[in-house]
Amino acid sequence: MTSALVAIDANVLLNLYRYNARTTSDLLAIFERFGDRLVVPHQAIREFHRNRLAAVGNPEGAVQDLRGALDKNQRSTGDALTRWAKQVALDDAELLRLQAIVGDAFDSVREAAGEADPDKVRVDTPAADDRVLSRLGGLLQGRVLPQPPADIWAALIAEGQERVEQQRPPGYLDADKADANPEEGAAGDFLVYRQACEEATRRGLDLVIITGDEKEDWWWRHRSVAIGPRPEMVKEFFDLSDGRQLFLLTPRGLLQLSEVLDVKVSPGSVEDAARSRGELDAPGAWTDGAVYELLRRLEAERQVQADVIRTAAELGGVVDRETVYAICGYDDSRMLKGFTRPTARITTDLQEEGLVAEHVTPMLVPLYPDDVRASGFRIPTEVVGILRSSTSSSRDDELRADSQDGGKYAPLTDWLLTQTTDTLPMAFTEIELVLRDELAPSARKHLAYWYSVRNALGKAIAAGGYKATRADLVNETVRLVRRVPLTDTH
């Protein structure tokens, strides 16, 4: 705190708009005490200006929403109170007294909202009147690290994107930001970290990074307890700086250590900084219209992600890697790099058109449990409900078919066991000739039916040593691929 270089991340600067005025003032007072040891990496200031208006938000609109809700609830409360008074034969004087209590309570909340409102910056507040921007302007003069030359900057971006793919900290959990920030993709956190490390090394100082990011791609955690920076980052900086130390602090942690710098802060500031800012950016929910419009646009572009999303919904919200490969007809050597980009790009378009909430949960979230390869993808819970509700009757048919006619797929298993080729392109009618029976209705309605091993058809295909790929419900074709090719056996 008294000798290290202190680098400020973009999220800390952005949260200065979200904290109350006292917390913001206390943090800025600490920043000022660092003097020339305070720096802001170039990428951090870029992200600050890029996202500043979003951080400012719409406090006036929130106040109007609150007042509208108060008016509506006061009316409904008054009506309910009047009905109750009639039912219990309450005398008029007592009813008037209770109505006055209710009115005073609602008026108190309106008054509090009015008093809090003027203190906030709005998107149309002139820069000269923006209390955060004005103070930062003087504080950060000469302390923003310059952007490296273009060739070095491009190399750093490429390195950062490669690290995201390899799940090397920091920042690999921001993979879905790649399409929102096309210039640097998902390398933003790495750019902040690397430039701070290089500046501390140049000065021969230890390094403290102040960040509001509390994810495990920055922090070494034991269960829910944050211990410090990821060990990989500690070692990397140690090697780069010839033995210097790396530390991470959250704004709350910084406020708690303010006395080290002889700065007195309000206890309320510590409490305010401890409050999760994520609740201000709570993910919006996908609507029926938005989900179907996203799928429509994916299908218009012939993007396989539409089938993956529908299948994930049928499977309860998560689709594993093997099923994704089966749906897409991918070779096992293919990586899933960039798989979520079409959905992220279209989601951004829908947000700009006002069809999707600003902070909506990504449609496809990659799952990385153990290694650098995605093990599958998760879709938002509400999307599962939206897509499954439209097919619930078909799923009931599927379950009844499985329970009543599970044995009818045995001929398919027997036939597959006699095949000598690793790939079998087949029409649905050809499979029905093998079965001497019709496929269940769901086989012609839902892609997930072909890729699941929990229904009778999937079990029969798996028992025959094959898996379904490239199912096409329009042309009624499917490709059955041997799970272990004969050429791989000895």
Image (cartoon, rainbow, N blue to C red):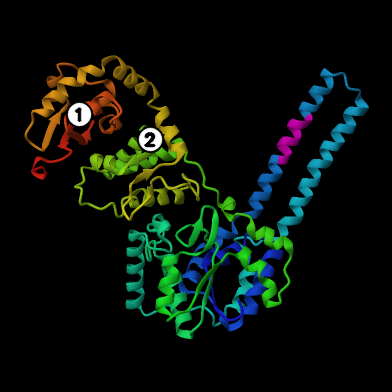
- Is residue 472 visible to the viewer in this orientation of the structure? yes
Q: Position of residue 40 (x, y in %)?
A: 52, 75
Q: Is residue 44 left or right of residue 275?
A: left
Q: Position of residue 296 (x, y in %)?
A: 34, 39
Disc 1 on helix, strand or loop? helix
Disc 2 on helix, strand or loop? helix
- Quick one: 146 or 277, which is closer to the camera? 277
Q: Looking at the magenta stretch, what is its main secondary structure? A: helix
Residue 74 is drawn in which quadrant? top right
Which residue is label 1 attached to?
A: 463
Instruction: List the single residue furthest toward the left.
Output: 420
- Quick one: 488 or 405, which is closer to the camera? 488
Label 2 is placed on what type of residue?
Ala
Locate the N terminus by quadrant: bottom right
Q: Position of residue 197 (x, y in %)?
A: 45, 76
- Quick one: 259 or 124, which is closer to the camera? 259
- The boundaries of the magenta stretch are 70-78
Instruction: List the single residue furthest toward the front.
Output: 490
Q: Which mark is residue 48?
A: none
**Measuring 22% from the left and 51% from the top, which residue is drawn there?**
334
Q: Which mark is residue 313?
A: 2
Label 1 is placed on what type of residue?
Ala
Asked whether the residues under the numbered discs 2 and 1 touch, taking CB atoms below 8 Å apart as contact, a structural biologist would say: no
**Measuring 18% from the left and 38% from the top, which residue is drawn there?**
483
- Quick one: 389 or 398, which is closer to the camera? 398
Instruction: List the single residue furthest toward the top.
Output: 404
